[in-house]
Image: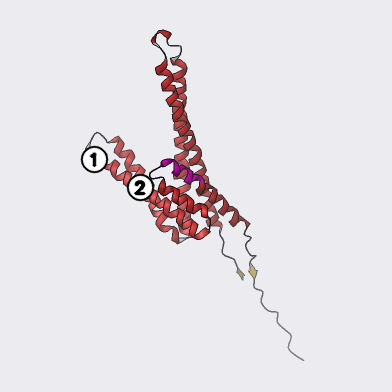
Amino acid sequence: MVVAPVSSADLVDSFRKMREGLLYGIIGSILVGTSIFIIFLGILAAFSVSPGAGGGGAGPALAVFASGVVVVLIGALLWLYGFYGKFIPGVEQLRKARPEYSTAASLIRIGFIWGLVLVIIGVILTLILIGILLVVIGYILLILGYVGMIILCFNLNSNEGNSLYLVAGILFIIGIIIPLLSFIAYILLYVALGDTLRRYSSMQPAPPVSLQPSPTLPPPI
């Protein structure tokens, strides 16, 4: 009979998925932010071309604008894949391994997934009243998902004992007013998850204990 130790493989895998998702999201956000700035410069360059100068200056400006749009799309796809394809499934896996994360996981799943769906449908249907209503409901759900991120950070700080989670949660709260701080919070969360992964990886599980039956002693003479 073999008594196996409690495995933390699912827990480690959930942290790894969350961290990978944040990495994709951070890279995607940087690409989007940089590209929007480039697009803005392209627009300024296009409007700064004087009519008498011909179209020679407008061509490069339009090329910069088009390149910026392409990079924005790439960044947005990276963010969507990272957050919805990696991070949220990682949080769901964490919820299954640790039930105390259920509230945060539910808010994140319902808020961000259904919120995004309703916002997209609402934007498509903005010409009718129901579209505006769907956008409002979707935005409220996205706020609930954001609250779930705050709760997740506080829960991680309580369970893992890493103050970076606490700082990230506080920055998420302030980020409601100053959005740039939310981006910094995602970076801190990424760093903290890396520390947690290294700590769990350094834990060597105890070898399984094999219970051997006692040998039969010969009868006394």
Report x, y in % for residue 116. Answer: 36, 42
Range of magenta residues = 178-187
Report x, y in % for residue 147. Answer: 38, 51
Is residue 14 at all visible to an observer of this figure?
no
72 and 214: which is toward the camera: 72
Residue 15 part of the magenta-drawn span: no
Q: Is residue 173 above or below residue 122?
A: below
Residue 184 part of the magenta-drawn span: yes
Q: Residue furthest top?
A: 52
What residue is disc 1 on? 130
Report x, y in % for residue 32. Answer: 46, 33
At 26% from the left and 39% from the top, the residue drawn is: 132
Alpha-carbon span between mark 2 and mark 1: 20 Å
Q: Is residue 194 above or below residue 129?
A: below
Specify the quadrant of the image occupied by residue 1: bottom right
Left or right side of 202 for 110: left
What residue is disc 2 on? 143
